[in-house]
């Protein structure tokens, strides 16, 4: 549950407000209003120390890699796409080994907290869409059917979830009476984030973006900011 072990959120008045909002969220049994306020405060605190921008950049780089690879699979097939991105050694291997190799290729290293969070978000999301893949043909089909708009929305959503719990899962768990309550509370928070994004996210009908260069990365960075902004309204609620 969560990923916060050993990590303490930064200090500063915005982080103090966020910690207070998280405590209030737990005491109020994770009502929508309390969750929204906590995430909104977290978004603003994250922006105050440039963590949000750094996270957006990491998401943009890894996300554009996935989009470019998906385009290659659709146009030249899985094995040729592996050749194109320098992963020829994965050809002919079992689907699980190819999946692990692709995860490593899409990842941005672990030199920063934002990179670690983005990597975990990607792994969780890719496992959701590829968890039942049994062979090369099914793996190729996943990328052929990968919807660009949906992927970007879901990947950013997953990043926000993982980022929030990296900072506050330990605090949430410590305030719950038992593990069952903590699991239910985390589930409500995840559901709130997903529904808020799904209700407000603007699908752009993407077509001719160059995912290999700055155009693709800039697009995803802008979408990250757009998604963080979805939660702004909650901070003003009393």
Image (cartoon, grey):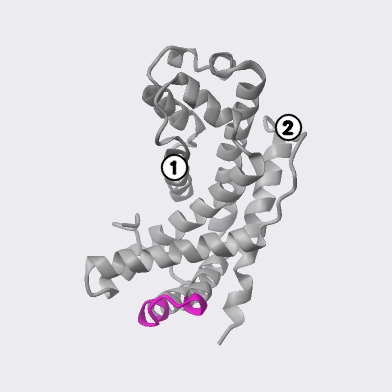
Q: Is residue 142 left or right of residue 110?
A: right
Instruction: Pick out the residue farthest to the right.
Output: 208
Q: Is residue 130 left or right of residue 50?
A: left
In reply to whether residue 30 is colored magenta, the answer given is yes
Depicted 155 relative to depicted 5: above or below: above
Between the C-alphas of marks 1 and 2, the distance is 26 Å
Task: Name the image quarter holding the N terminus.
Answer: bottom left
Task: Name the image quarter holding the C terminus.
Answer: bottom right
- Asked if one can make out residue 96 in the rendered structure from this viewpoint, the answer is yes
Say which element carries label 1. Answer: helix
Relative to the observer, which residue lies in front, 88 or 142?
Answer: 142
Q: Which residue is denoted by mark 2 in the rendering?
A: 210
Q: Is residue 124 left or right of residue 232?
A: left
Give coordinates of residue 167: x percent, y percent: 40, 62
Say which element carries label 2. Answer: loop
Task: Tell me if label 1 and label 2 are in contact, CB under 8 Å.
Answer: no
**In the picture, residue 19 is in which quadrant?**
bottom left
Relative to the observer, which residue lies in front, 17 or 96?
Answer: 96
Segment tinted magenta in the rendering: 24-34
Instruction: Pick out the residue farthest to the bottom.
Output: 238
Give coordinates of residue 26: x percent, y percent: 37, 77
Label count reads 2
Relative to the observer, which residue lies in front, 58 or 139?
Answer: 139
Give coordinates of residue 76: x percent, y percent: 64, 16
Q: Nearer the viewer, mark 1 or mark 2?
A: 1
Q: Residue at x 62, y 71 (%)?
A: 232
Give coordinates of residue 136: x percent, y percent: 46, 20
The secondary structure making up most of the magenta span is: helix
Q: Which residue is denoted by mark 1 in the rendering?
A: 128
Of pointers 1 and 2, the one earlier in the residue sequence? 1
């Amino acid at each position: 549950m969560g990923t916060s072990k050993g990590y303490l959120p930064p200090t500063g008045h915005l982080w103090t407000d966020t910690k207070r909002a998280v405590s209030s969220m737990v005491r109020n049994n994770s009502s929508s209003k309390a969750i929204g306020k906590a995430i909104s405060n977290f978004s603003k605190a994250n922006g105050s120390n440039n963590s949000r921008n750094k996270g957006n950049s990491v998401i943009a780089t890894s996300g554009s890699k996935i989009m470019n690879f998906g385009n290659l699979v659709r146009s030249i097939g899985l094995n040729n796409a592996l050749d194109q991105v320098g992963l020829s050694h994965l050809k002919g291997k079992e689907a699980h080994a190819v999946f692990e190799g692709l995860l490593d290729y899409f990842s941005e290293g672990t030199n920063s907290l934002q990179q670690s969070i983005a990597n975990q978000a990607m792994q969780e999301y890719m496992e959701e869409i590829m968890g039942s893949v049994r062979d090369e043909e099914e793996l190729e089909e996943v990328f052929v059917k990968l919807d660009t708009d949906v992927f970007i929305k879901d990947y950013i959503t997953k990043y926000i979830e993982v980022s929030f719990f990296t900072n506050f899962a330990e605090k949430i768990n410590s305030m719950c009476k038992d593990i069952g309550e903590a699991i239910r509370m985390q589930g409500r928070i995840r559901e709130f984030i997903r529904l808020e994004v799904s209700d407000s996210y603007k699908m752009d009908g993407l077509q001719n973006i160059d995912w290999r260069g700055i155009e693709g990365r800039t697009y995803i960075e802008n979408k990250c900011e757009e998604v963080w902004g979805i939660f702004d309204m909650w901070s003003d609620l009393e």
